[in-house]
Image: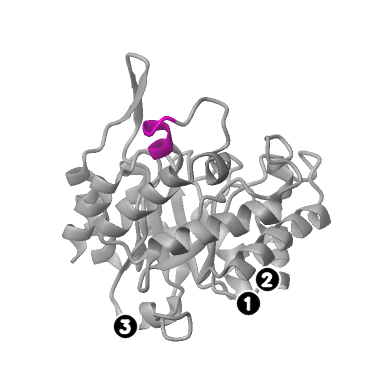
Amino acid sequence: MSTATRPSFSELLATRKVLLADGATGTNYQDKGLGLGVAPEEWLFDSPDLVLELHREFVVAGVDLILTDTFGATSLRLADSALEGRAREVNLRAVELAREAAGDTVLVAGSLGPTGQLAEPLGPLGPDECAAAYAEQAAALHAGGVDLLVMETFFALEEAVPAIRGIQSASDLPLVVSFSFDRGTHTMMGVSPRDFVDAVAPFGVAALGANCGRSLADADLVVVQLLEAAGDTPVWVKPNAGVPKMIGDQVVYEATPEIIAEHIRLYVDQGVRIVGGCCGSTPTHVAAIAAAIR
């Protein structure tokens, strides 16, 4: 199926009650052998077979869209990795692999994560520099052939707002913006779901959401507040598989596939339109979610 005939993100939202996104990238890579201190994007070149393997596992689990391995692929964040100066190449390669795994019907979403720097006035990242970095990444993802763009795990409006401006200056693709409310119902910078919606909704984004965060109990509360604030804008939710715990030398997430699926089924019943999993969410978790919501 060509890009011209593949349903768009907007068309899928208009014709289906709920869309299913994939699960975690980083924690699943770690389970597949990603070493400490290695940027996940390095696997795009060093272990592309494993990148394809995870994408395909999520496709088999029944997703409607997968995210590219580009969470840390702004030029600013890559400056601290072995991929410094290769932002466009990294993003194009990630789309190529995701598109190969997605086949003819699954959509590919370009993932854009925080730079890892604090924005002014608390840190050195200025709004113009921020906007330029995200414009560069969005342009590369768009050129590579993604169907939509997803800003995920943001926590500061001072970084997110310039990022949105930069992205929208470089691409007219649908944009989802998702924050991480990892302090209960607030982000680490004190942003509430209402604050988030009030600041971001005026940009005409395709969906507003929450991902990562802390516990599923916290996610339950965030979902209620997001739905109340978002109005007619679709809501996107990808929670962690519960709270991580150290068992021996391994990090284990407490929520079984059945537990996370039950929470997400309730989110869908409340009106959430796009769901999936974040840290700790394996293809098995995503398959359970697929069964629960369909």
Region rendered in magenta: 27-33
Q: Label 3: few (<14), some or many (≥20) within 10 Å?
A: few
Is 187 rendered above or below residue 31?
below
Residue on which the image places disc 3:
15
Residue 270 in which image quadrant: bottom left
What's under tag 2, amino acid-wise?
A: Gln
Q: Nearer the viewer, residue 156 or 93?
A: 93
For badge 3, the amino acid type reads: Thr
Q: Which residue is mark 2?
A: 168
Q: Residue at the bottom extreme?
A: 5
* Mark nearer the N terminus (1 vs 3): 3
Distance in Å between CA atoms under marks 1 and 3: 22 Å
The structure's colour scheme is: one colour
In reply to whether residue 225 is colored magenta, the answer given is no
**Res. 102 in view:** yes
Q: Cα distance, mark 1 to mark 2?
A: 6 Å
Q: Which mark is residue 172?
A: 1
Main SS category, magenta section: helix
User: Pointer 1 and pointer 2: residues touching (CB < 8 Å)?
Assistant: yes
Instruction: Relative to 251, say whether 44 is above or below.
Output: below
Give the image location of residue 75, x and y in percent: 73, 48
Residue 201 locus on image (x, y percent):
57, 70
Splitting the image into 4 quarters, where does residue 216 fall? top left
Point out the tag, 3 or 2, that comes first from the N-terminus.
3
